[in-house]
């Protein structure tokens, strides 16, 4: 089991300090996000390789993955916005390759960027699907020798009008027609949208490339009622070998609660075996 944590959840006044804390707390890697540090913006990770590489070298931890923001979502009504966001994804994929990260977490759209209903040409969902698949295929085309995955994340109904379940994400991955397009399964969002979390994971395990961990209340594992053992059992049965990354609230002293969360997760993983 490889457990990472998003860097902005860690204490420390620099990226190197945050990576060092991650190692001290028992994490296996760090997920870089496009927020939480003033010098990192999505699509510009490659401009800061010295700082990132130094943090990796000092801590001896890898970067597990890169994560985008709402302003980077691939689907938008404005063609210029879409083009800029596609460029950002391509640049982030190249940075992920350089860093040895598994991939880049990308989303179609959130509620603040609605797509119009242009029926009978296509309603909002149909247009979103066409625009998303085009963006995914184009990102793969522009990185022909790449190995980093595009990790497509479904959200919950309160955050997005489109792409809410693993099954829907799986259908998009298949239409994108590239082994580099995978699902990013977030247990918090799944808890709001899936009828059965272990079943959803099992049914779509072949396309899952990354997993975000948060408890039912979007807090650290062990602070809610999500059955992590059952979820891990489904993934272990499917021989999942990808990263898990914490994306959640941190209540309490990080020096105490973050190592405890790692312990909870490893105990659940062992129990799932």
Image (cartoon, rainbow, N blue to C red):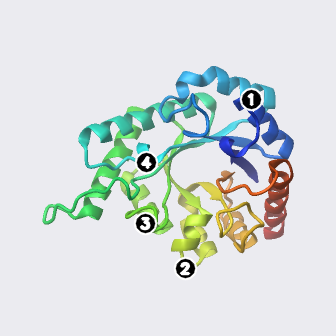
Which badge, 3 or 1, comes first in the chain's sequence?
Answer: 1
Can residue 144 be seen at all in this image of the molecule?
no
Gap between marks 4 and 3, in whole Å?
16 Å
Gap between marks 1 and 2, in whole Å?
41 Å
Question: Is residue 178 rendered to the left or right of residue 224?
Answer: left
Q: Position of residue 242 (x, y in %)?
A: 66, 51
Task: Please report the residue visible at 34 percent of the width from the left and 53 percent of the height from the top.
Answer: 113
Question: Is residue 63 rendered to the left or right of residue 137?
Answer: right
Question: Is residue 243 rendered to the left or right of residue 66?
Answer: right
* Residue at mark 1: 16
Disc 3 packing (10 Å; few <14; some 14–19; many ≥20): some
- What kind of element bears circle 2? loop
Q: Quadrant of the C terminus?
A: bottom right
- What kind of element bears circle 1? helix
Farthest residue, direction bottom: 195
Q: Which mark is residue 195?
A: 2
* Residue at mark 4: 178
* Residue at mark 3: 168
- Where 160 sits versus 6, above or below? below
Are the two marked residues, 1 and 2, in contact with CB atoms closer than 8 angstroms? no
């Amino acid at each position: 089991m490889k457990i990472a944590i998003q860097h902005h959840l860690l204490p420390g006044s620099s990226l190197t300090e945050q990576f060092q804390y991650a190692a001290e707390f028992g994490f296996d890697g760090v997920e870089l996000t496009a927020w939480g540090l003033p010098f990192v913006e999505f699509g510009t990770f490659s401009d800061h390789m010295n700082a990132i590489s130094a943090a990796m070298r000092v801590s001896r931890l890898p970067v597990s993955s890169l994560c985008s923001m709402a302003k980077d979502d691939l689907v938008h009504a404005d063609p210029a916005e879409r083009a800029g966001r596609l460029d950002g994804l391509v640049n982030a994929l190249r940075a992920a390759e350089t860093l040895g990260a598994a991939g880049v977490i990308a989303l179609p759209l959130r509620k603040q960027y609605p797509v119009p209903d242009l029926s009978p040409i296509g309603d909002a969902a149909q247009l979103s699907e066409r625009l998303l698949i085009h963006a995914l295929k184009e990102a793969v085309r522009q990185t022909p020798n790449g190995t980093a995955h595009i990790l497509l994340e479904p959200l919950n109904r309160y955050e997005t009008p489109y792409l809410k379940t693993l099954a829907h994400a799986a259908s998009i991955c298949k239409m994108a027609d590239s082994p580099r397009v995978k699902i990013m399964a977030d247990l918090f969002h799944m808890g709001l949208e899936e009828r059965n979390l272990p079943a959803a994971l099992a049914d779509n395990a072949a396309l899952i490339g990354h997993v975000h961990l948060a408890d039912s209340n979007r807090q650290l594992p062990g602070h809610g009622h999500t059955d992590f053992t059952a979820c891990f059992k489904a993934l272990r049965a499917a021989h999942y070998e990808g990263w898990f990354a914490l994306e959640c609230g941190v209540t309490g002293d990080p020096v105490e609660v973050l190592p405890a969360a790692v312990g909870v997760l490893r105990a659940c993983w062992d129990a799932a075996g």
